[in-house]
Amino acid sequence: MRFLTCLAQEHDLRLVVLAAAFCLTGSAITIRLLQRLRSADRGARLAWIFMGGLSTGATIWCTHFIAMIAYQPGVTVAYDPMITGLSLVIAVMGSAIALAVAVRRWSFAPVLGGALFGLAVTAMHYTGMMAFAARGLVAWSTPYVVVSVFFSVVFGAMAFTRALSTRKRDNPWPATMLMVTSIVLLHFTGMAALAIAPVAPGLDQPDSHGATMVMAFAVAAVGLLVLGTGFATYVLDMSSRVASQRRLERVMEGSVDAMIVESEGRIIAANGAFAELSGVGDDDVLGQSLGRWVADIRSIEPGALVQRNLGAADGSVIPVEIALRVDQDQSQSYMIYALRDVRQRLAQERRIAHLARNDSLTGLPNRASFLEWSHHQTTADGPGRRLALLSIDLDGFKDVNDTHGHAAGDHLLATIGKRMKALTRHGEFLARLGGDEFVALIAIEDHEDAIDLIDRLRAAITEPVDYDRSSLSCGMSVGVALWPQDAGELSALINNADLAMYRAKSSIATDYCFYEEEMDQAVRARRRIASELRDALEHEQFAIHWQVQASVETGEITGYEALLRWTKPDGTKVSPFEFIGIAEQTGLILPIGEWALRRACQEAVAWTIPWKIAVNLSPVQLGHVDLPRLVDQILVETGLAPARLELEITESAMIADPERTTHVLRQLKALGVSIAMDDFGTGYSSLSTLRSFPFDKIKLDRSFMTELDVAPQSAAIIRAVLALGDSLSIPVLAEGVETASQLDFLRTEGCNEAQGYLLGRPGLMGRDGNPESEKFAA
């Protein structure tokens, strides 16, 4: 009851209310300053301790002083100014020490700091009471003093602990009320411990109540000034922090990546990108740990870029790339995570990897995958391991492209690729190398395993494909090479399978062929001849031999045909039938043909009699649009008159591209040279060919003269050709005339010219500047 009677009967309640209001305001400011002090940087911490100590000391001292003024013991009282000032110093310094200790990194620092605050309040209170002087006898109650100290220390520790609690720091009012309780209980319990007995009852000084009230409000005004300074400082700092926070939020929200800021294992900031990525609301993110969504998050090192899986709210697992940066200040550290959704990137990487190893049109593995798989299979351990490599080429695919267009060809390839995928069995590897070339590699026990796959491939490839109201189809040619029977290296195995495939392509009876050693020998022979042809061209091993052409009617020489001959350095003569085809395949026919044309013109210019000369053109030469320019250049260089030059072409040279060939021939005719159709009767022998271009001569193939005596059909064909030439006004020259009876038949049928061994064998130029050939005597 002493506490209540002291408060109700011995205090001016108006000043008590003023002291309580001041205490509440100051305590609220003190708690905010305490919370701010914990996150302050090292350089600013001392200033915040000073401001916090000044504000807290002013709070408890002004509360105490106003409450002391409100105390009315019934006797005249006075205060020693020196001791009163000392109590203010104790309040400020004690509060500053308490605040500095409370924000240390120790686990018990808030409790210790609160207890020191309680002791500072106690020291200030009882020091201030020492400055109290009254006209009477003063008595103290020890139990009340002890209880007041206990209240101050316990509630001070509770206030600081609550204020610095991580989970409850955002609400300062519970801590504020605990601090108010600590100060109020100390003061009024301490005042209840005081009892004053007047020395002379009834005798007192004149009433000084008005002056006391003025002094109390003056003290409160000074205290509020101090508190206002602290509060203004706190507000300015908070405004700066809020502005920084807003800038941080704008930066985080402007990032396309998910951003998370963690402190002490709890998320304190997150942008909308993370909420969208994880599928949870913003309120469900703050206060949580990032480990809730990303496992093993603590193993990430700062500065590293790692990939983890994020568990979304809908149960899906999202691959993310995480970067971590640590921002450290004096009070705490911040873990700043950036999370990037890499689903699209991984999908693109998988697609790129798939395209790098698979054909985009058919979906089959490509050349790189085939080579890798083949290398693995041919180097795998296993005694007696046998493999079959199938080289597959589509027959007639070019016709599909030319007739229906490339879109149709792509559709055909894509359909065949799907069918191949469907027929593939375990252990069988099929790939597309490019164009219409495919390949297969399988493990076999015998030849029948490879033939079984060929039969399945034939069914998949030759079955027609519907496209745009049309039916597309093609055939196949398959070459098979066996491992290790046919080759000891992968490159040789592939080469041998290609050789077998080309043999199958040229075969009429079958569409597949197994490799045989003779194929390789033939290829080596072709390669050897090609190499020797290059040397022959470089070292002038070629020569021009001339064969006479004469009039059948008069026997007079009409010209000479230039024939290319090759003599090796060892004296071996190589027939044109052996090397012309290889020269055309390798492209060497172009420089060889140019050499032959130039040499023939050079030699003909030196003749004393300007005979006409005939030079053969290869279909490969005729396929080049710059042939007219080359012929014109050679004529100019050698000085040969264009009318003396006759160029011979075969009918097959015009079949591949008749429009372009006709255009080239017209350009040649424009130079003044004549054009002859060579080997007529062995090709298509179509009248449209003769109609499309006005040839200057038709040369009847030698095979008809050879069979003239044994095949009556040959005589009929010769008569037909002669009649055709006569009706078209085109002279006809018969080749291969070797007997007098053949010549008599040609004369009887009205043939214009002839050439052959009967008239003269091919030879070099004579010493007199003319070709070595005897004149035919009629």
Image: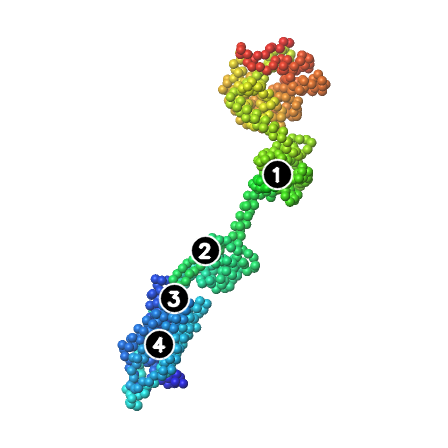
Q: Position of residue 438 (x, y in %)?
A: 61, 38
- Packing grade of label 3 (10 A; few <14, some 14-19, many >=20) is some
Q: Is residue 765 visible?
A: yes
Q: Earlier in the sequence, mark 2 or mark 4?
A: 4
What is the crowding at mark 1: few (fewer than 14 residues within 10 Å), some, or many (at least 20)? many
Q: Quadrant of the N terminus?
A: bottom left
Question: Residue 511 appears in which quarter of the rendering?
Answer: top right
Identify residue type, mark 4.
Thr
> Which mark is in front, 3 or 1?
3
Q: Which residue is mark 1?
A: 439
> Which residue corresponds to mark 4?
122
The reply to whether residue 408 is visible in this rendering is: no
Please give left or right for residue 202 compared with residue 328 in the image: left
> According to the image, label 3 marks what residue?
104
Residue 345 drawn above or below residue 455:
below
Q: Residue at x 51, y 23 (%)?
A: 538
Distance CA(mark 2)–CA(mark 3):
27 Å
| Closer mark to the observer between disc 1 and disc 2 | 2
Tell whether 22 sits left or right of 419.
Answer: left
Task: Evaluate if marks 2 and 3 touch, with contact meaning CB atoms under 8 Å apart.
Answer: no
For the point 56% across and 43% down, the residue is 357
